[in-house]
Amino acid sequence: MNTSYFVDNQDCFKHQACANVPSANTAFYPNRFDCPSQEGNSSVTPSLASTHVELETSLRKLAQHKMLQGDYSEAIAMITCLLDRHPDNANDYNNRGFIYYQSGELDAALADYNKAIQLNPDLAAAYNNRANYYAAKKELMKAIADYDRAIDLNPLHVRALINRGITYRELKLYNQALENFDFALRLGQLQGQAWKERGRTHHLRGDWNYAIADYRRALPFFPEGRQKQQIQTWIDEILSPFQF
């Protein structure tokens, strides 16, 4: 009854460097990097520098593809290659940490999230990702603190809002959980996930009519698969005592 499903925990900042990145349902990596200055290196022409940027962007996209295929070691190797070239790139530490997290190497993920935050204390995605690590470890108050920081840095961070709501629910602080889901719904992103988690919160505190209503709102947002099946199972749990 208490199983939680945290929202995919990497996101792309909405600035020009991210303009061509696919939606969050298909891509997790920001098309962003901080190249060191080329001043004083006369052998590097603007066209060559542009080629380097394009190659690095392609490598990030390929690493993301490998991760989605479950080839975590190859994806990690690609991001590590980028970090060898640009060891001060907080985004790539965050990206590699996310891949480690997906592969189950949680301690390695934490180390990379910490490094990303050290390099860029204003990187909201890294706080959200580190919070998910703490939540997985059941260090829920540490998770809340990092979600708070992510939302302070980016008040429209829908993933952090939903994840913080899930964590409040784990703490049985249902009103606070619902406030987070309500705000996420007002932002108009990841609505299926927000309806689902709000419904689960109503379900766990015994407000079954509200739960069923939210579950039914969530269903159209999901394709056939695990999440849709889970929502239907929860609906059936509520309705089964009344079926004769």
Image (cartoon, rainbow, N blue to C red):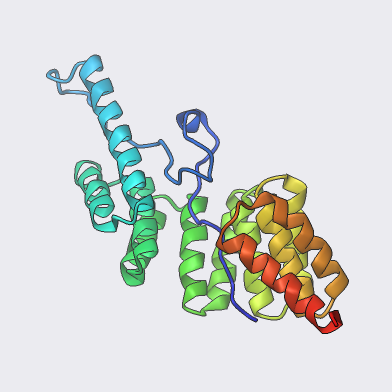
Residue drawn 17% across the image and 20% down it: 44
Q: Position of residue 207 (x, y in %)?
A: 85, 75
Tell me if 96 is positioned left or right of 84 in this view: right
Residue 121, visible in the rendered structure: yes
Residue drawn 45% across the image and 53% down it: 121
Q: Position of residue 55 (x, y in %)?
A: 26, 30
Tell me if 117 is positioned left or right of 7 in this view: left
Residue drawn 46% across the image and 55% down it: 126
Depth check: give the residue in front, 171 or 236: 236
Say above or below: 174 vs 91: below
Dividing the picture into quadrants, the one containing residue 37 is top left
> Which quadrant of the rendered structure holds the C terminus?
bottom right
Q: Position of residue 185 (x, y in %)?
A: 75, 52
Residue 184, visible in the rendered structure: no
Dividing the picture into quadrants, the one containing residue 208 is bottom right
Number of numbered callouts drawn:
0
Depth check: give the residue in front, 187 or 7: 7
